[in-house]
Image (spheres, rainbow, N blue to C red):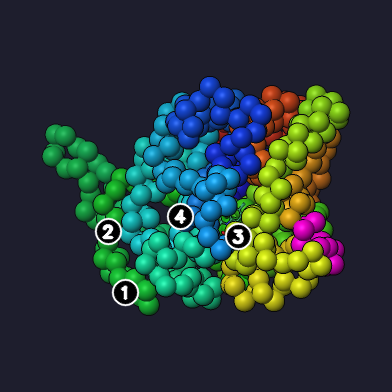
Amino acid sequence: MSNSELLHLAADISFIHTDHLWRRTGSWVGYQYYGPDFYEDIARIASRGVMDMLFFGDAAETPEIYGGDYAAAVKLGVRWPKHDMTPMIPLMARVAPGVGFGLTVSTTYHHPFHVARLFSSLDHVTGGRTGWNAVTSAYKNEAANWGYDSMVLAKNRYARAREHLQVVQDLWASVEADAIVMDREGGIFADPEKIHLLNHVGEYYKVRGPLPTMPSPQGRPIIIQAGQSPDGMDLAARFADIQFVHRRTDASVRAHRAELDSLLAKHDRKPRDLGCLWSIRVQAGETDGEARAKERNMLDQLPPDAGLIELSFFYGIDFSLFDGDMKLSDTAEMVRAEQVHWGTFEELMKTEDPDIRIEELGRKFIAERTLFVVGTPQRIADRLEEIHEAGGRNGGIILAKNFSAPGTIRDFVELVVPELQRRGLTKREYAGTTLRENLVN
Ligand SMILES: Cc1cc2nc3c(=O)[nH]c(=O)nc-3n(C[C@H](O)[C@H](O)[C@H](O)COP(=O)(O)O)c2cc1C
């Protein structure tokens, strides 16, 4: 992705309208719920902080695992409602120069021709500021919405994803960068020699091509991958420019980077071809006391079952059914059998006490699922620098959610970013107009 050793900044703004977040102090005050003004303001704030990317995750479903139906999800507003966030991106891009946008679209449920055309069109409208988070979709309730009786098994999801990503890349390459001539005098719009058929016939897809879109202002949209199982890591090493990663300790960050580097070598790619954005939850205050008070306030406002609902959502089993004695290690085989987010569950198993009771894990999960830091701008900058160092200064961080929206991202930009810039860790202005230029520089 980059030769730069700068710390790149992104924020995960998926589902910040739901879960415990919609009712937090200060959230959505003065905004139409789930409306564009709110997202435009977040984009403006990110642009002021010279942040590289805002990211929308997706899972097109109503969670039904916790408690066996969707009552808890809709009653508490947990991971529901879920709009398709694509229309929000051009609105945000118009008001926030420099910021790029990551959007999640599933390789399991959407045809590669549709994906290639959608991202090409978004890339054109945003002036080359889009990234595609290519996920295989490991949420159980999603499958039934797209016509499947049950979720496609992990091996098959990844086999399909490998062909899918290759087709999308080939479609993007089917229109060369200088294909458009627009010679008004000569009456030539595009050079037919620079536009190519694909004639792809594979195991899952048949696509003739070429892609009927303008060439991308950034070569092609950025490809993001976030799977952490062996197949997920391999997919990232083959295709991705960026990987989003949930790790919980510096040792895991180092081990993850080393594993990725050896996989990249297998696919004839270099470590710098794929940067990692480490997911970290940040709670900033002018003083340690202020930051801790914000954190306490956040934890106090969580519904009691929030963590168990999240655990059920991610790991596909109903955590409301377990009695007080159930331990983390007792659930491992059940989770493995679900073929859902095994990569992140394995990380929990490696970094958490295997004897922790499920009830306590539920309480911890929301706040400590990924790396986190609470404190002054100096303390946070120190911590981000340590993580960046552990990851070989190859990428940056993505702020995990737990936003008092838009307060947390504003705190980050107003309190922490000046300290990062003062230390020369992050850039003071955008290097270019496209996402690729900003990630590379
Ligand atoms: C920061 C981050 C964001 C993710 N966003 C999504 C998402 O929006 N939708 C989704 O289906 N999976 C998402 N995932 C999950 C992964 O893409 C992947 O599907 C999941 O980890 C299961 O694959 P694995 O077993 O290979 O890890 C995300 C993962 C991470 C670390």
Kind of residue indicated by mark 1? Val
Q: Which numbered disc flags the more N-terminal residue, 2 or 1?
A: 1
At mark 4, the secondary structure is: loop
Kind of residue indicated by mark 3? Tyr
In the rendered image, residue 328, in percent from the top left (x then y), is placed at 77, 67
Pick the quarter of the image with the C terminus.
top right
Which dot, 4 or 2, sits closer to the camera? 4
Numbered range of the magenta stretch: 351-361
* Label 2 crowd bin: few (<14), some (14–19), many (20+), radius 10 Å: some
Q: Is residue 190 visible?
A: yes
Q: Which mark is residue 431?
A: none
Q: Which numbered disc flags the more N-terminal residue, 1 or 4?
A: 4
In the rendered image, residue 149, in percent from the top left (x then y), is placed at 42, 73
Mark-to-mark CA distance, 4 and 2: 29 Å
How many discs mark residues in the rendered view? 4
* Label 4 crowd bin: few (<14), some (14–19), many (20+), radius 10 Å: many
Magenta span contains residue 412: no
Image marks 4 and 2: residues in contact by CB distance under 8 Å: no
Which dot, 1 or 4, sits closer to the camera? 4
Residue tagged by mark 4? 60
In the rendered image, residue 180, in percent from the top left (x then y), is placed at 27, 44
